[in-house]
Amino acid sequence: MRLLLVLPAYMPFVGGAQTFGRAISRRLTADGHRVTILTTAAQQADDFWQPPPAGRTALPQREEMEGAQVIRLPLVYPWPAPYRFGLARRLTHLFARLPLPALWQRYLLRHFTRSMPPLLGLQSELPPLIAAADLVLVVDASWDGLFVGAAQAALAQTKPLVVVPLIHTGSPAITARFRMAHQVAVYRQADAVIALSPSEQELLAGWGVEQARLHCLPLGVEAVDVAAAQKQSEDVRRRYRLPECFVLFLGATTYDKGAFTLAQMVAELFLQGQEMHVVYAGPSQHQLVMFRDIFPPRVRAILQERLHLLGVVNERTKQALLAGCAVLALPSRVDSFGIVLLEAWQHSKPVVAAAIGGPASIIADEETGLLVPFDAPAALAAALQRILNQPGLAARLGAAGRQVVTNQYTGDKCYDDLYQIFNHIRSVADAEDAKSNRMGRRDERL
């Protein structure tokens, strides 16, 4: 099989879509399939709306990575960057709510969002790549210009199309960014739509996606060497001068991810005479620094001491942090699934997450983790303190989580389920092609 995978960013960019895309690509290439990845040159989120800093090494536009051919399209920055991007994004969401006929709205939205993200060479690269593919997989509808453009190009060439929207279900305002008319049209026309959680599946069904083409496919994780990570955890703790007991946060350190709530929690605990340390590993840490610097000088000094900002770390360091932490916190409202929860469970670590979106669908409250409201520092502090102060509870939750991963969320299971979907779609497409050929030959005889 020749697969074309389209997604807005790829390694070394850090994110859930990239983890999913890389896992599928590696599995397919290991099984002898040909994978081409069409993506952008973005290395971090800011690259989508403003030029990267001077001196940063640019990524190759074409290279082979882990057996797959990666093609990165250059990003462009029309005047007045970076403000044009944010303005266009907001106007698009506003425009999507106007009471226009669906056909007009889809056309205008498609035209208006071609620069989401603004790319150079998309129209020339797409057609031959799709023509050479047996199946097209498009991931992440939040970048609707690339998502819809690639999907429509695949549909125009009648190629089997699978889409993974990665809809954030934790906030109606954010969910609205995934249900614009041109996006919904793609969901309804695709041969298969992959939801990562029951809540996402329910939304897609409500937007008119046929049940026969709608699949709920939870992600899985590859096996890790837990013992090796445990041995390395002490070295990592010394390298970064971390305390022996810390809460770990993995992901982009933004408000919607809950990173600000954790910082607010630490500040409130300090004012109550209590101490807690949080280690952040992931991109966009400048946003958290700006939030931290809003606090009064005395509190800011404490936050500088108790919030440990490591930036993006490599896989080995991440696993060591998971092995060494007391608990993983993911108080986010923008996780379609929450694969970091599975990674923590692999190390038998307890987890605390917001009771919305993907994490709420995989955590059984009080059984495999604790769920709290989004943006509720006091509730988050209470949940984390329960785990830190009750070793028995922490051990029970961590062990139960590890059992869940072992039984339900392995990389093998995720890949096998997805591959079955691919095979089914291709067999249906082949049958339709054969039927069309037979009809054509009959018409010629007549």
Image (tube, rainbow, N blue to C red):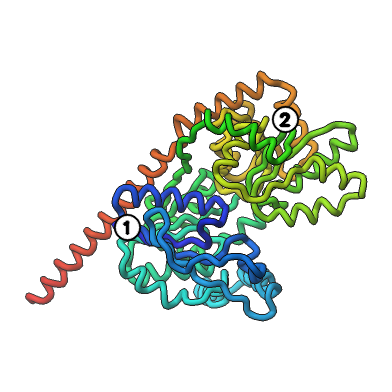
Q: Of the numbered discs in the image, which one, if any, rests on residue 34? A: 1
Q: Is residue 377 left or right of residue 162?
A: right
Residue 297 shown left or right of residue 355 in the figure: right
C-alpha gap between disc 1 and disc 2: 45 Å
412, above or below 22, in the image:
above
The answer to whether 192 is drawn above or below residue 319 in the figure is below
The one nearer the camera, 210 or 231, is 231
Give the amino acid at mark 2: Cys
> What's the residue at 66%, 35% (across, down)?
352
113, above or below 297, in the image: below
Q: Secondary structure at mark 2?
A: loop
Quadrant containing the C terminus is bottom left
**Amino acid beneath label 1:** Arg
Residue 75 spot, x, y in % from top left: 56, 72
Q: Residue at x 64, y 71 (%)?
A: 51
Using residue 96 as the reference point, say whether residue 209 is left or right of it: left
Lower position in the chain sequence, tag 1 or tag 2 = 1
The N terminus appears in which quarter of the rendering?
bottom left
Q: Nearer the viewer, residue 231 or 244?
A: 231
- Which residue is pictured at 77% across the width and 43% down the height? 307
Q: Which mark is residue 362?
A: none
Front residue of 94 and 6: 6
Which residue is denoted by mark 2 in the rendering?
A: 245
The residue carrying pointer 1 sits among few (fewer than 14), some (14 to 19) or many (20 or more) residues within 10 Å by Cα, namely some
- SS assignment at label 1: strand
Circle 2: is it few (<14), some (14-19), or many (20+) Cα within 10 Å? some
